[in-house]
Amino acid sequence: MRKVLAGLGIVFLVLVLSGLVGAGFGMWVFTRPGPLPDARVVVVARGGEGSAYASLQAAGVFPDDAWTRSIFRIAVRLTRPDGALHAAELTFPAHASMQQVLFVLRHGRPVIHRLTIPEGRSALQIATLLADAPALDGKFTPPAEGSVMPLTYDYEWGMSRAALLERMQHAMTRALTHVWEGRVPDPAIADPQALLVLASMIERETAVAEERPMVARVFLNRLHQGMRLQSDPTVVYGLNRGAGPLGHALSHADLTTPTPYNTYVIPGLPPGPICSPGAASLEAAAHPADGDMLYFVANGHGGHDFASSLGDHNRHVSAFRQHQR
């Protein structure tokens, strides 16, 4: 009987020692520095701990061996009260241990991407920017002209393009509503859509901030007097629907080509916006400058000369042509 008890004691001791050795080895694997040579951004795939491990091993965060894989699964289960693992684009530090990796998987902040929509871009150009933006997912319906607010938008890996576009359009709706409610009323601008159209023309006519309210006043004065607006950017838009510059100076044939947007031909505002205007152009359309200006022309120095009479305007045109020569 004593021999049996002694034998059982030895077996128990071996089991205990084996357990301690196994636990010690597991803790060593759990806390040892990993093979990652430098900090790295990794897209952790959806699908649970198996997909997470595969993403991390492929990126070099974990070595490719069965021991590490098994201990990772055990560690995930033992530390489950610390939170769920997240599928996201995350940054892992150089030589991250398994312990550090699990912390990042549970508490790390996803990488933030940014997409800037510059002022004055057309719907076609905005659709291209959205389609080419990295880390976004899925297809989208191209936006209506002028429906996107030019801003810089933050997003995370895996966000759908349709969802980001919806956020951009909501931003324009809010901005246009705010500007419309605070506008200086004008009989030529009957609704928010007309204000958006005017703002898009202002945006394409000048990049000089202080000129925008003056450009707005010229167009409004012309509308009040029943004059053609004669805006070159609307002619270009009518010819290529916002695909970009024509590649040549506007010709007489261009100016006389009848399109719904050719304001040398049609009366009043064009039927829709020609780009997405920024906040400054929206404000200029809602709060135009005072004055009786009816004309403006580039002055060759990055801005424009404004005039109330055709005679003064012609002199400005002559000065600009002389500057070009």
Image: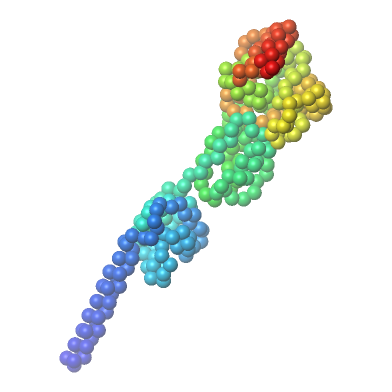
Quadrant where the N terminus is found in the figure = bottom left
| Residue furthest front in the image | 325
Image: 41 above or below 259: below
State the residue in front, 159 or 319.
319
Q: Position of residue 248 (x, y in %)?
A: 73, 29
* Among the 4 quarters of the image, the one containing residue 296: top right
**Which residue is at a point 77% across and 31% down the rendered structure image?**
239
Image: 223 above or below 312: below
Q: Position of residue 184 (x, y in %)?
A: 62, 16
Whether residue 295 is visible, yes or no, is: no
Image: 239 above or below 226: below
**Which residue is at a point 74% across and 19% down the rendered structure image?**
229
Image: 276 above or below 85: above
Q: Is residue 313 left or right of residue 100?
A: right
Whether residue 319 is visible, yes or no, is: yes
Q: Position of residue 134 (x, y in %)?
A: 56, 47
* Among the 4 quarters of the image, the one containing residue 130: top right
| Residue furthest left in the image | 2
Quadrant where the C terminus is found in the figure = top right
Q: Position of residue 63 (x, y in %)?
A: 41, 65
Q: Is residue 235 left or right of residue 302?
A: right
